[in-house]
Amino acid sequence: MGDEALARAEEAELARRRDGELEAQDIVSPVADGDERAIEGALRPKRLDDFVGQARVREQLSLLLRGALRRGRPPDHVLMSGPPGLGKTTIAMIIAAELGAPLRITSGPAIERSGDLAAVLSTLQEGEVVFIDEIHRLARPAEEMLYLAMEDFRVDIVVGKGPGATAIPLDIAPFTLVGATTRAGLLPAPLRDRFGFTAHLDFYTPEELGVIVRRSAGLLGVHIDDGGVEELGLRSRGTPRIANRLLRRVRDFAEVKTDGVVTREVTRTALELYEVDELGLDRLDLAVLSALVRRFGGGPVGLSTLAIAAGEEAETVEVVAEPFLVRLGLLARTPRGRVATRAGWEHLGLTPPPATDAPTLFD
C-alpha cells in the first residue's frame, strides 16, 4: 500500500509539472536551495565600506551615491564591466542598500522582447534600482526601448500590427539602471553613452583576496591560519568568487581529513586533490597548456585545433582558459596562432627549445 501511495504522489507531481502548477521552489529542494542562497548571501558585503578591493571604483561610487542622497534624486545610471566573479552583482546590491531603495534583478538573455522590458519598467517604484546582468546580450527591440527609458523615463507601448499600429507613451517612475557586462566591446555605443557613470573592475591582488578569505572564513565558521589565508589568496586567480569557492572546498577537506583547521599544508593538499596548482591553474588550463606544448611543440597552433586536442569547445578555451594563461604570461596569441612562452614550458617542468623566445602578449 505504501508503494502504491508513493507512486500516486509521484504521478500527481508530474501532472502538476505538466500543467505548470509547480513553482521553481517546489521543483528544487527547498533545503539545499535555501542553504546555498544563505551561504552566498552571507558572503556578500552589504555596504560599500565593507567591500574589499576596487578602491578607486568604491571612492567614485561613494561620491555618486552621497551626492544623489543629498539632492534627493536617483543617481545616474551605472555601467560596470570586467571579468566574471569580481563583484558586479554585489555592487548593484550595495547601491540599492546605500540608497535604501528596492532592487529588481534580471539579465539580458532573459529579456527576449521589448514587452518583457516594458513589463519590468512599468511596475517600478520611484527611486528603484534595476540591475541587468550581461546587458550586452539584450535583444535589439528591448535595447531600443531602454534608450528612451533611461533618458526620459518613458516607454512607448506599440499596440497593433502593420500600418494600423499605434505607439502609446507610458511614463515610468524615475529609476537607476545598473548594467553589468563581461564583454564591454559588444555593448552598442548609443547604450553605453547613456550611462552617467562607468567603471571597470580589475582583478584583485593576493593580499586583497586574503582579506576576503579571512572575512568569509569568519562568516562560515572556518578555522584558518595565516598560511591558509595566504595560500588561498595566491591560488584564486585574482577573483573573489573563486576564492570563496576554494575556501568551501578546503573547509570540506579539513573537516573530513584533518582536525578542521585550514593550514597552509592542508590547503595545498586539498587543492592538489581538486587539481588547482600553485598559480591557480585548474584542469582546463593545464590541459590547454599541456596540449600546446606536448602535442604541438609549443605552437603556433589554431584555436580550434588546440581546443580539440584539449577535449573542450573552442569558445570555452578562448573565454575561460586563455585569458588567465595570457595574463600569467604562459601563452601568447600571435597572428599565426597560439604559442607557449618560455614561462609556459617551464611551468610544466620542461625545457623550452632554443628558438622559444615568444613575448608574453600578442593582440
Image: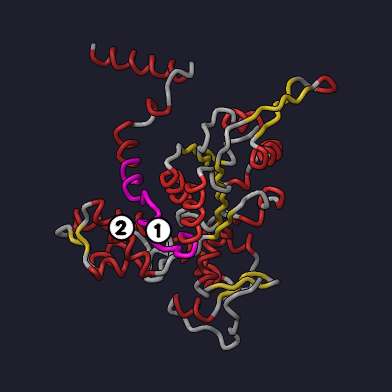
Quadrant for residue 182, please give it.
bottom right
Q: Residue 247 shows which numbered tag?
A: 2
Residue at coordinates 44% horizontally, 15% vertically from top-left? 15
From the viewer's perspective, tell me whether residue 123 is left or right of residue 263: right
User: From the viewer's perspective, is 270 left or right of 111?
Assistant: left
Please name whichever residue, 303 or 42, is drawn nearer the observer in this view of the structure: 42
SS class of the residue under badge 2?
helix
Q: Position of residue 39 (x, y in %)?
A: 31, 45
Nearest the eye: 222 or 337: 222
Quarter placement of the N terminus: top left
Going by the numbered disc 2, the residue's amino acid type is: Leu
Disc 1 residue crowd, few under 14, some 14–19, many 20+, Cα 10 Å:
many
Instruction: Answer with left or right where residue 244 lies relative to residue 287.
Output: left
Q: Write the start and end of the magenta stretch as one range.
A: 37-58
Position of 135 relative to 336 (above/below): above
Q: Is residue 170 magenta?
A: no
Residue 290: give x, y in percent of width and height.
50, 69
Tell me if residue 90 can be seen: yes
Residue type pointed to by label 1: Pro
Q: Please give the name of the residue rendered at 52% of the width and 62% of the height, measured from the top-left corner.
A: 321
In this view, 205 is above or below 153 = below
- Which secondary structure, mark 1? helix
Q: Nearer the viewer, mark 1 or mark 2?
A: 1
From the image, tell me which residue sits under label 1: 240
Residue 239, quarter of the rendered image: bottom left
Which of the two residues, 297 or 343, is positioned nearer the viewer here?
343
Q: Which mark is residue 69?
A: none
Determine contact: label 1, label 2, CB under 8 Å: no
Q: CA distance from mark 1 to mark 2?
A: 10 Å
| Depicted 181 relative to depicted 106: above or below | below
User: In the orientation shown, which residue stands out farthest toward the bottom?
Assistant: 354
